[in-house]
Amino acid sequence: MMRIFILLIILSSLSFSACKKKELNFKLKGTVTASNTGNALAGVSIKVFTSSLGNSIEALKESTQTDASGNYEITLQRDKYEKVAIRISKDNYFNEAKIYSFDDLTTEKANTTNHIMSPKSWTRFTIKKNDPTGTLKILKNSGKIDCEECCDNGFTYYTGTVDTEVICANNGDTWMKFQYWKGDETHVVDSVFNTAFQTVDYEIRY
């Protein structure tokens, strides 16, 4: 009887340790799709970073890629950190990220976090102002603004003679709207459709 009792204690201890070890992990999974088509994206880089309280420096903990169906799954060890950042990237798509606090995650089931990525496209404005007098005023009304390649919405002014190019990135398969004034006489309202992965040329002469 004593041997059986000791064996039961050992088995119970092993079972408890296994459960405890399992609880120390967060499972993160999801699907990545394209904004313009809704299709799954394969080969997307998924990186998981953590940061602790009072320290904004992120530490890379895990990484993987989406499979042919756009799915991914990562196991993250439960540790002493405050935030978890899931950052995704793929060539010719804008990077995306989702940030969670430690309390947002659970060890009881998989934490599902899906992502939508926008393909890149560009408008190349060729601006030629040969009249040294007057002001060319351009107003960008719409288009992506939250990236390094993006152009802010708002006014831009050109005086004197100008011969330059300005390239503005945009989400693929969306419109970029703008208008411009040549001095006080000519006012043009226009737009271009930015096809995914392509550059549209638009020339403004004054």
Image (cartoon, rainbow, N blue to C red):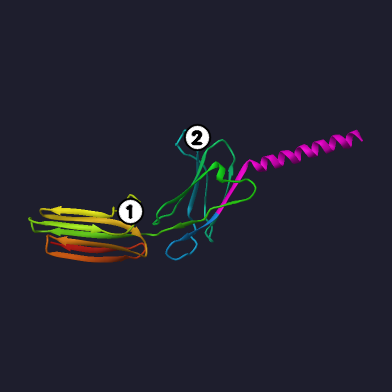
Residue 2 to residue 98: above or below: above
Residue at 20 percent of width and 59 percent of height: 126
Question: What kind of residue is marked 2?
Answer: Leu
Residue 112 position, x and y percent, is 56, 53
Residues at marks 1 and 2, CA–CA distance in whole angstroms: 30 Å
Residue lying farthest to the front in this orientation? 184
Residue 131 quadrant: bottom left
Magenta highlight on residue 64: no
Say few, some or many: other residues with alpha carbon within 10 Å of mark 1 (under 14 / 14 to 19 / 20 or more).
some
Quickly name the residue at label 1. 145
Residue at 34 percent of width and 56 percent of height: 144
Chain part drawn in magenta = 1-29
Residue lying farthest to the right in this orientation? 1
Say few, some or many: other residues with alpha carbon within 10 Å of mark 2 (under 14 / 14 to 19 / 20 or more).
few
Question: What kind of residue is marked 1?
Answer: Ile
- How many numbered marks are there? 2
Dominant SS of magenta comes to helix
Residue at 33 percent of width and 58 percent of height: 170
Residue 168 or 65: which is nearer the viewer? Answer: 168
Quickly name the residue at label 2. 53
| Residue 80 shown left or right of residue 192 in the figure | right
| Residue 105 shown left or right of residue 43 in the figure | right
Of labels 1 and 2, earlier in sequence is 2
Residue 135 quadrant: bottom left
